[in-house]
Every structure is written in C-alpha cells, then in structure tokens.
Amino acid sequence: MTPVREFLYFLILLTIFSVLLFLWKAEKEIPASALVVQEPIPTLVQKTSSPDDTLNTQKIEQALSEIPATQQPAAGLFHPVPLIFAEDDSLRFQLLERQLQKAAQSNLPVRVIYFGDSQIENDRITSALRTQLQAQFSGRGPGFVPLDLYYNTRHKLILETSDNWEIKTFQDKDFINESLLFKNALLTSANAEGWFRIRRIKRLNPGPDYQLMKLYYTATDSCLVTVTQGRDLIYSGYLLPQHQISTLDFQFNRTPDDIRFDFAANDSLNIVGLSLETGSGVLVDNIALRGLSYPTFESSNQAAIVQMLRQVNVGLFVLHFGVNLVPVQADDYPNFRRNFQRQIDFLKRVSTDTPILIIGVSDMAQMHNGEFVSYPNIPVIKRIQYEIAMQNHAAFWDLQASMGGQGAMSRWVNADPALGRADYVHFSDEGAEIVGQELSRILLEALQTPADTLAHD
C-alpha cells in the first residue's frame, strides 16, 4: 500500500471513530437541571447605599495590575488618555462604585449597557471590557443577545434560528421597535412556529459561562414552548398573553452545551431579546447599531424599552458613535447635536441617576493626494460629543487622542499586526482588543480616583 493510501485509510478510520465517540457521548450526557420561572414585571426598586460605602481601592489596584499591558506593535501607536468629567460633576461614578462593591452579592447583575455603531459589531471592544470587569467583580455570560444568527468566539457559542422568524429592526419603517436591543423576532398567526438553538463551540474548549437564560417577550395570545437539552425534554408549557415585556427564566447548574427552544404561537409573539448571564456580578451588553449615529429611542416604543430597562440593574450607559457621521463633511452638525441630546434626555428620564459615558469618534482616514489622511471634520464631531457630555454630567473619553490623534488610523492600519482594517474606518480584532483593554483600565482608574480628572478645553 502506498503512503498516500495508508494516510487516507488512517484518516477514514479516525473519522469513523470520532463520529461513534460523539454519538456515545450524546447518549450518555446528563443534562443540567433547569428551574423555570415565569415572572411578572417587577416594580422598580431604587437601591440605596450608606454614605460610607466606598469601593475597595486595594482590589481596584490589583485589577489594574492584572490587566495585560497594552500590546503596542510599534512605539507611539497608543497614548493613554483618562476619562474627562465636568468640573461641577460632584457625583461622577459614585453610584457605579457602590453597585460594583456589592455586585458579587447582588440579586441582579450590574449591567454596562454599551450602545455603539459598527465599530463594536461581533462583540469587538466590549468582549475585552467584559473580560476585565468580570474578572474583577465576578459574573459570566455575554448579557443581552438578539434572537438572530449570533456567533461569539469569546464566549464560544453560536445561536441559530429557523427561517420563519420575522426579524424587525430600527431600519423597518413599517414597524415600531419594542426592543432595547433594537432587534425584534416575531412569529404571527400566519407564521406561527419557530425555533432557536444555542450550542457551545466544543472545538474551542469552552469553560464555564452563563448559568441563567432570560427570554424577554410579549405575546397577544398563548404560545406553546418546549425546551430540549441535547436529546432530553426539560420543559413544556405555555407563555401566557403578555402585552408588557415579561420574561421566561431558566436556571442551570452549569452552562448547557446544546439547548433548543420550539414555539407554536396562536397569534403574535415578539421576542425582544435574550440574556445569557449569571445571577450576580457584572455584565457588559453589546448593542451594535450599524449605520446609526445614536440609538433611536425616539422612534421606538419607549414604554416597552422602559419596561425592559426596569427589569435590570443598570450601572452605566455607554454611547460609542460617530463613524457614520464623519463622511458627511460639514462645519457644524446641529441636527446631530439636537438628536443626540434627545437620546441622552430619554436615558436620564428612564434611569435618572445612572451615569453615562460618551466615547468620542475614533480616527478615520480617506485618500487625499495619493495618501490616507484623517478626515478634517473629526474635531468638529468630537467637540459636539464632548460638549454634550459636559452639559449632561456624563463622562467623556477621547478615543481619537488615545489612538494617537490626527493620522492615527493610517498608522494603525499599517502596524504589524494591523490594528485597523483596510477600509481605514474600523478596528481589526487586534485593535479592538487593545481599545477594550484600555477602556477597562481607565474605567477602573476613574473608579479608584474619581476626583482627579477635570474637564478641559
């Protein structure tokens, strides 16, 4: 037998053995037990802390020392820039400090709800931020996930759906968004059956992750739900009609490897989001809104978004936008200023004391006279973001300055490895990791010394 045939014969035997081993494990696997709770909308409870509750600065210092050094492929590519607060902002992140102090013992995880544009798609930036905050304050899981095809290598899971879900987003003019995630998955009487499945990516050797799954929904009529874990049926029951956002909760002893939900709706069912989490600690929710310059709360069903927000414990809102506005070059952007302020007003009405962090637009480059140079209007947009932050007692982070200022994206694209993509707009995975690590570092630094950084012109 030739060496080639010997190799092929060995490969075939190995494949057959792997398939048999997989089938044997599937038959033997014992599912994690699930506790199912269908909850009404809870009353909003304002938690208070005694004045002497202060964050353990020793733990913060330890966390800062454990964050990996920012990987700089070449000197001068990244410049540490602290968060900026208004001079008369005496509160700053004090409430967030108190929430994080008790996060490990809390009945609800503290959430950092991170809204952004395409810069944060696929969990870029947020995954690195989440890793650092959960390492310090406990918690597991990616947090909010829309019911749509979803692949997350950091959490080593994939979400698949049947084709008959009708996905509605902020881009659909004939539909009013009801989801904090700005993505709605609908079944109707004409299209009444659907399923979704969450599997762990075993080839990536996943470790412990989420142990609590919450399904946020509204339903105009009852809906049969069956849940299987592997080959085992673990739940069968009905979702009752709910015109306000309600949840169906599943608590697991360990992260399920493979879980599937099947629905048979009598009328309209809208799943406005899932949350994969633990019952305490910290979550960082990635809400990526491609093509937008701010979250469109005003054109959404605000009552539904309020209902969703009041069922969670928000510690910080992050607004990271700007790259979609940059190509529209102008000397001023009054519409952007007005509309951005309206979204801030909405968040402050819904969650009065929750701090907000506005991240300034990152550097972008365009071809000019045969070379890539920064867009000249970036300082104008950044100035508007900064002024809105200061006027609203929000924190501000100058991401372009952190990248190295004017011309930074061109240098990032040409670094080895490349920290920016060839479109000279978006970060590469390596670049996004660096941005996320740096954001976690300066956030922890601000928690440790909240009074040291003042606003500047």
Image (cartoon, rainbow, N blue to C red):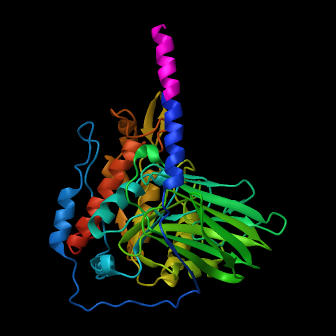
Residue sitting nearer the eye, 246 or 90: 246
Q: Measuring 49% from the left and 89% from the top, which residue is drawn there? A: 44
Magenta residue span? 1-13
Position of residue 387 measured from the top left corner of the image (x, y, whole percent): 41, 68
The quadrant of the rendering that contains the C terminus is bottom left
Residue 170: quarter of image:
bottom right
Q: Measuring 30% from the left and 60% from the top, which residue is drawn there? A: 132
The residue at the far right in this view is 190
Q: Is residue 433 left or right of residue 334?
A: left
Residue 447: quarter of image:
bottom left
- Type of secondary structure dominating the magenta stretch: helix
Position of residue 12 measured from the top left corner of the image (x, y, whole percent): 53, 25
User: In this picture, is 46 found above or below 76?
Assistant: below
Residue sitting nearer the eye, 140 or 273: 140
Position of residue 176 measured from the top left corner of the image (x, y, whole percent): 71, 71
Q: Magenta stretch containing residue 195, yes or no? A: no
> Can residue 215 be seen from the camera position used here?
yes
Q: Measuring 61% from the left and 80% from the top, which residue is drawn there? A: 246
> Can residue 82 be seen from the camera position used here?
no
Number of marks present in the image shown: 0
